[in-house]
Amino acid sequence: MSAARLGRCLSIGIALLAPVRVDAADVTLWHAWRGEERAALETLAARWTAAHPDAPLRATFVPYDALAGKIEAAVPRGNGPDLFVYAHEKAGTWAARGLTLPVAPTPGALPVAAAALADGERARGWPLAAKALALYRDRARVPDAPADTDALRTAARRWTRPASGTAPAQWGLAMETTSAYAVAPWLHGFGGGVSDGARLRFRRPENVAALGFVHALAREVVAPELSGAMLVRSFDDGRAAMAISGPWMLGELRARDAGGVDWAVSPLPVVRATGRPAAPWATVETLFLAREGPDARAVGAWLAGEESAAWRARAGRQVVARQGVGYDDPALAAFSAALEHAVPMPVDAVFALHWEPLARALRRLSRGDAGPEAVLAQADTDVAVLARPPPAPVAPAPWLAGTALLAAAGLAYGARGAWRARSEMARAAHAYAWMAPALAGVGLLVVLPFLVGAAVAFFETDGTSWTFVGATHFLDILLARDWGLASPLSLWRTLAVTLLWTAANLVLHVVLGVALALLLREPWVRLRGVFRALLVLPWAIPSYLTAMVWKGLFHREMGAVNAILAAFGVPAVGWFDRFATAFAANLATNAWLGFPFMMVTTLGALQAMPRELEEAAVLDGATGAQRLRHVILPQLAPALLPAIVLGSVWTFNAFNVIYLVSGGEPDGTTDILVSQAYRWAFSRGHRYGYAAAYGMLIFGMLVLYGRGVGRLLGGGVAGGAPPAREDKA
Amino acid sequence: MADVDFVALAKCHDGPRGPVEVLRGIDLHVPDGAFVVLVGPSGCGKSTLLRCVAGLETPSGGEVRIGGVRVNDVPPAARDVAMVFQGYALYPHMTVRENMGFALRLRKDPDTDARVEEVARMLGLTGLLDRLPRQLSGGQRQRVAMGRAIVRRPRVFLFDEPLSNLDAALRTQVRAELRRLHAQLGVTTLYVTHDQVEAMTLADRIVVLQGGTVQQEGTPQEVYDAPANRFVAGFVGTPGMAFLARLEPGAVVGVRPHAVVLGRGPHRGTVRFVERLGAEALVHLEREGEALAARVDGPGLASLPEVGAEVSFGLDAVHRFDPATGARQA
Amino acid sequence: MRTPPRWNVALVHLMLVIATAVTLFPVLWILAMAVSPGSVGPGSALPVPQGVSWEHLRAVVGTRGADGAWLFGRQLANSLVVSVATAVLGTTLAATSGWALSRWTFPGRGGIAGLIVLTQAFPAVVMAVPLYLLLDALGLLDSRTGLVLVYGTTAVPFSTWNLKGWFDTLPRELDEAAMLDGAGRWTTFWRVILPISRPALAVTGLFSFLGAWNEFVLAATLLGDERAWTLPVVLQGHVGEHGANWGEFSAGAILVSVPVVALFFLLQKQLVEGLAAGSVKG
C-alpha cells in the first residue's frame, strides 16, 4: 500500500473514531420503538423541529435490551437524554432514584394510563401508548368472540385434536400458560391478584381457582411450551385457532393474501364463575422527563397530545394512551377497548419481585409437580425470601481500619520484596518498560473497574442508596441462609451444577475438537479447506442468535430435534421439563459453540508435530487407538492444556447459553453461578451488592482453581515456571 | 583483531535446588590470531565460556578481556565478535544476502553488498544469495552461518558446535575449509566442540574442560602425548586409552592401543573380540578382569588371534597416573 | 505418505460430512429465516424457507439515517474500524509484553503472569458499571475510541498469553544472533522477531478482532447515536421487548458473519499451517 493511500485510510479511520457530535441545543429523546412506531415517532420529531427550529428534537433509537441499562448508567452522570420512552412499570424505582422528574398530568389520557402514572397531583410521565393482552381468533373457525370463559373453552375444545398420521396437532388456544404476565388476567378475573393490598400474597382462594382454570385449559386445549415467536407462528400457521397476545403480534402476522389466517381481535372474555372480565395488566409506554428544561417539557406535552396521538395511531399503528382517538384498523380499536378493563401495573419495586416466584409456580403447575394451592404457597415462601428486608447496616469503622491495615501490610510486604530485589529490578528495567503499556492499559481499564466492582459486594445498594453491610452478603450466600442447601438458589447446589457443566463441556469440546482436527489433517481428505471453513462457522456467527436458534430446535412441539426423534418413533420430549434433558440441551448448544476453538488449536498443534513419530509407532505395531493414546495425545497435551484451562474458565462463566437456551429451567436447576449472579443483579430486584458478592465468590473459586491447575502443571500455565527467587519479590 | 583473556572467570546459574557453579575460576590466554578449541563432555561449561565472550551470559566473577580491555559490562553488540550457532540461527524471513548483510546494514555500512558478494564467492554461495534459509540444504545453511560471521570482519570468531548437524563426510570437508579460512583471515577463533577429533584436527591449541575448570591447555600434540590427568587421557585420542590398575603397584597405567604389541611380551590376556577396520584391526583383550585393546596393522592382519585365545603382549609406551587424584605421574 | 485403504477414506469423509451437516443445521435455520418473506421465527422441523425474498437483506443493507445518509455503510465502517483498531491495539500491547515475559526474568514476572490468567476470570457482571463511570471520567463516552480502548485492553491478557506461547517456541539463538549482529533489543524485536511471528500475530489479531466484532453490551451502552453504532448493536436493534424481527435479525447476523468467515478462510494458512516450526529452526 502506498504511503498516500495508507495516510488516507488512517485519516478516515481516525475520523470514524471521533465522537459523533450532538448539538447541545437539541432536545434528545431515547426510545426502543421499531418499525412503524419508530417511523411515526421520527416523523413527529421532524414536524416538531420544523415548527421549533430553535429547539430541534432528536429521537435516538436504542436497542430494547440496552435501553434500561443505558438509562441507569447515563442519566445519573448527566449523560442521559432529556426525554426517554419506556414501559411505565419502572416509574416508581426510577423516580425514587431521581432518574425521572414529575410532570403535569396529561389531559385526555386514557383512565388506565392516567391511573398508572398518577403520583398525587402530578404524573410520573406522559402516557404515549398502552398495551394489554387480548384474544386473537381465526374467524373461519371461531366466527364470534367468545363472551365468557365457558364459550372460550367450548370453542377451543372444538378445534383441538391430537396429531394423527401426517396431520400435525391442532390446538384451540395458544397462550403462555407459564408466564406470570399472561396468567394475570385470570387472577384478576377470578377476583384475585398478586397482592392483597398490603403486600404480595399469592395463596388466596380466588388465585387457586384461577390457576385451576388455567391448568385445565393447558391440559385440554393449549399448545404446550409456547412463548414469543412460537406463539406467533402457531397462530399464523393456523395450528392454533385462537391466541392470547398483545398488540405487538399484529405486525408479525402474515396478511390474508400472503397465506395468513383471517383473524380478528377482541377483549378477553368474562369469567363465568365471577361475572368479572378477565383483566390483563396494562403497560403504558411512557415518555419520561430525565432532565429539566422548558423545551423538553413542551415536547413531552406535545408528544402526548392529540395531534401526535392521532398520527401515532394512524401511521405508527399504535394503541395510543388517549381518549377519543379513532382507529381505522378494527384490531387496534379492539386493543383499545381491551384497555378498559385492564389493571395498571403497579410501579413500586416490591411489585416487580413477584414475577419470578409466580412464573416458577406456574411452571411447577404445568409440569404437574404440585396442585395450584401448593405451588402458590411455595411462591409465597419464595417471595418472602426475595422481599426480605435489606441486611442491617454494619459499622464501617472496623472494616475501614482492617482494610487500611491490610493495605499497609501488603504495601510493606511489596516494598520489602522490591527493596531486596532492587539490583535485579534495576538490571531488568527494560523488561518493565516493555511490559508497561500493557500493564497500564489492563490496570486502568480491566483491573481498576474490577476492584471498584468488588467493593460493591460489601454494600447493599439499588444503585442510589448505599448501605455498608460488611461481609453479610458473603455469609448469606455461603451459608445459604435464606434457603436450604439443596434449594436451586443455594450456592453449593449451583456450584455442583456449574462444575458438572464445565467438566462436561470441556470433555465434549476436546473430544470433538481433537477428533475433527485429526480427520481434517489427513492430506488426502478432499475439500479440506471447505470443511475447515464450514466447521468454524459456529465461532463466526454471533452466539446470541445461534443460542436462540438452538432453543427453537429443542422446542417440544415445533423443534427439529423432536421431529427427528419422532422419525425414529421416539415420543416427544419436553426438553426443558427435567434437569437432565434441559442440561443436555444447554450442553449441546455450548458444545456446538465451543468445539471450533479446540479444533483450530489442535490443528495448529498437529501441524507442528512430526509425523515420523507416528510412523515409528506404526512400525512398532501400534494400532490406531494406541497411536492416539500413546503418541498423539501426549504430544498434543502441552499445546492443548493452556487452551483447556482458558476454555474451562470461559465455560465456567458461559452466561449466554444458560440464559438463552434453558433459562435455568426447570426451576432454576440448570442455572450456573454467573447466571445466578446476573439474576440477582437484574431480575431479582436489582440487588447489585448481592450480585457483586456472588461475582466475587465466583472469582475466588476460579482463583483457587487456577492455583490448583498451576501447581498441577508446575506453574507452566501462568507462563513458565518462574525462577524460585521471584516468589519473594 | 585481538587476543582474549579469562581471569578467574566464574559463573553461577540458579538451578531449582540453589545455585549451580558452571565455571569455577577459569584462567586462560587466547593469543591473537590463534585457533583455540574448547573441548569437553556436555555440561563441562565450554558453551558458557564461549557465551561469556559473546556477552550472552554475564559472568558472576572474574573478568573477560578482549584485546586487553575488560568487557564484562559491554553489551554483545559492542564487542565486535561474531558467532556461529549450533542451529545456525539464520533469520528465516531473510534471504541469504540479507542474512549475511544484516549486521552491516544495521551499521549502515556502504560496502554491505560488495562485502556480502565477496564472502559469498569465498564460500561458494554466490548462486544462493537470493534464496531463503528453508530452501537450502544443511551444509549450505552452515556455510551461510559462517559467511554471516565472516562478512562482519570481527575481532573474534566464536563457534558453538557448528558441525554437529552435518553428516560425517560433510564434516570432514568443512573442517578443512575452516582451517583454510582461518589461515586466510587470521582472526582469533574460539571453537567449542565435544568431538575430540574435531578438536585435534582444527586447533592450534586445545583447552580441555571438565566440571567448570580447565583440565589441560596446550597444542593437540602436547595434550595427546602428555595428558595432564586421567580425564584428559581418556577423553583425547580414538580409540580411547585403556587404564590398568593391576599392572603396577602405586599407579594406574594408561595405554593407547597402538602401544600394545601382540605376540611377545611379559603380559598375558584373553581375546574377547576383534574389530576389523580394513587397514587395521583392534583386538580387545581382557587381563585380570580389566579391558584393553591392541591395534594391529600390516602383516599382522593376516594372522589375527581367535576369540577366546590366550595371547601374550608387551607395552611400548605407557602413561602413569596417581590412583587417588588421577594426576599424571612423572 | 501412504494412502490408507479405500473404506477408511470413505469413513473419514462420511464422518466429516456428518459433522459438517450437524454444524450447519442451525446455520441453515438462520439462512432460512433470512430469506423467508415476512417475519418468521424458528419453529418447524426443517430449515426450509417459506419462499425466497431478499426483503430482509435489502432492508438491513439499505438502512438510511434521518439525514438520508447510507447508515448501514457507516455502521459497517464503524465495526471494521473499531475491530481493526482493537486488533492492532491489543496485539501491539500484547506483543511487547509477551516478548518480555518470554525472554526476560525479572522480579514480579510470576505475579504478572498470574494476573494475566486472573483477568480471564473477572466476572463481567461486576465490571460493567465501574467501567462506565471510568470512561465517563475520562471523557470517552459516546466515542468509538473509548470502545477501542476497552476492547483492546480486555484483549491484552489473552493475546499476551498467546504470543508468549509462540515466542517461547522461537529458538533463543535467533535473538542472540541478532544481538551479536549489533541489533539492540528493539531492533531485534522489530526486524527479526516480529517478521517471523506473522502467523501468531495474525491469529492473535483475529481473536481480538472477533471479540470486538461481536461485542454488543458495551457497545450499546457506550455508543449513543445510531451513526456511531457497530453492527452487533444494529443487530440487537431488531430484537424488541416482545419477540424480534427474525428475518432482519438473521439477515443481519449473516452479514456480520460473512467477514469473519472470509477472514478465517484467508488466515487459514496462518492459523494452522503457518506454525511449521521447520522454517524457524532451520
Image (tube, helix red, strand yellow):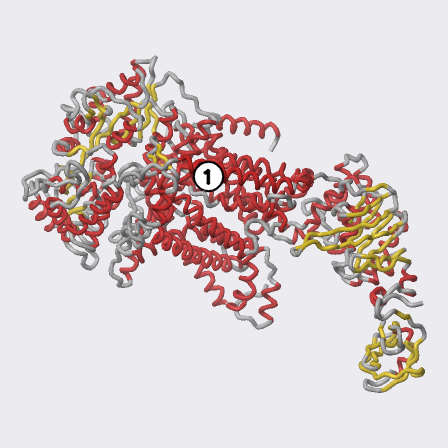
The quadrant in which residue A686 appears is: top left
Residue B226 in sight from this viewpoint: yes
> Considering the image in quadrants, where does the C terminus of chain B appear?
bottom right
A707 left or right of B245 in image? left
Q: Amino acid at mark 1?
A: Gly
**Taking C252 as reference, is A46 above or below it?**
above
Q: Position of residue A355 (x, y in %)?
A: 24, 41
Residue A554 in sight from this viewpoint: no
**Taking A387 as reference, is A37 above or below it?**
above
A129 left or right of B75 in image? left
A296 left or right of B150 in image? left
Q: Residue at x 19, y 40 (%)?
A: A200
Which chain letter matches label 1? A
| Residue count near mark 1 (Cα–Cα under 10 Å), binned few <14, some 14–19, many ≥20 | few
Label 1 residue SS:
helix
Q: Position of residue A337 (x, y in %)?
A: 13, 32
- Compare residues B145 and B38 and report the one nearer the observer: B38
B108 left or right of C23 in image? right
The quadrant in which residue A325 appears is: top left
- Compare residues B220 and A445 and report the one nearer the observer: A445
**Taking B208 as reference, is B125 above or below it?**
above
- Compare residues B144 and B192 and report the one nearer the observer: B192
Q: Position of residue C110 (x, y in %)?
A: 58, 47
> Considering the image in quadrants, where does the N terminus of chain B appear?
top right
Q: Position of residue A644 (x, y in %)?
A: 49, 53
From the image, tell me which residue sits under label 1. Answer: A402
